[in-house]
Image (cartoon, grey):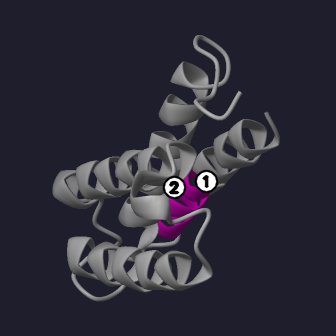
């Protein structure tokens, strides 16, 4: 529940940052592909961790490899720099995942 609330606040925050940047005349593009990439990355990331796929939660080495791999994929999704659009997508993906697993359905670990 904490992660859901924190991610909802983060999504609102990223929306505010985007709006304020545009209001101040900065050219901050909101790329739909980066938003979708952030959403997809977040959902896959949480699925792997929640279901302990490949033992990423139970093995320290696998957890380190997974963290490194997922960070590399996130960088690739956002074209090397995580911007407002990718961060917004990650927060939205986390909110969607936690709404589904946590509120509507029990978490796989429960």
Residue at 38% across / 74% down in the picture? 70
66 lies left or right of 79: right
Residue at 51% across / 69% down in the picture? 21
Q: According to the image, label 2 marks what residue?
A: 19
Q: Is residue 19 magenta?
A: yes
**For the residue labelled by badge 2, is the local secondary structure a helix, a strand or a loop?**
helix
In this rendering, does residue 103 appear at all?
yes
Q: Is residue 58 above or below residue 33?
A: below
Decide: few, some or many residues near mark 2? Use Cα within 10 Å; few <14, some 14-19, many ≥20.
few
Q: According to the image, label 1 marks what residue?
A: 16
* Span of residues in magenta: 14-23
**For the residue labelled by badge 1, is the local secondary structure a helix, a strand or a loop?**
helix
Are the residues flagged by discs 2 and 1 in contact, CB closer than 8 Å?
yes
Q: Position of residue 8 (x, y in %)?
A: 66, 40
In this rendering, does residue 27 appear at all?
no
Q: Nearer the viewer, residue 10 or 66?
A: 66
């Amino acid at each position: 529940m904490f992660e859901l609330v924190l991610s909802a606040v983060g999504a609102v925050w990223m929306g505010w940052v985007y709006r304020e940047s545009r209001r101040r005349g900065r050219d901050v593009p909101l790329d739909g592909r980066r938003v979708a990439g952030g959403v997809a990355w977040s959902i896959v990331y949480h699925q792997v961790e929640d279901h302990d796929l490949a033992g990423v939660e139970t093995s320290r080495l696998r957890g380190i490899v997974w963290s490194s791999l997922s960070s590399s994929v996130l960088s690739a999704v956002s074209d090397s720099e995580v911007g407002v659009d990718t961060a917004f997508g990650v927060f939205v993906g986390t909110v969607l995942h936690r709404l589904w697993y946590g509120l509507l359905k029990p978490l796989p670990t429960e």
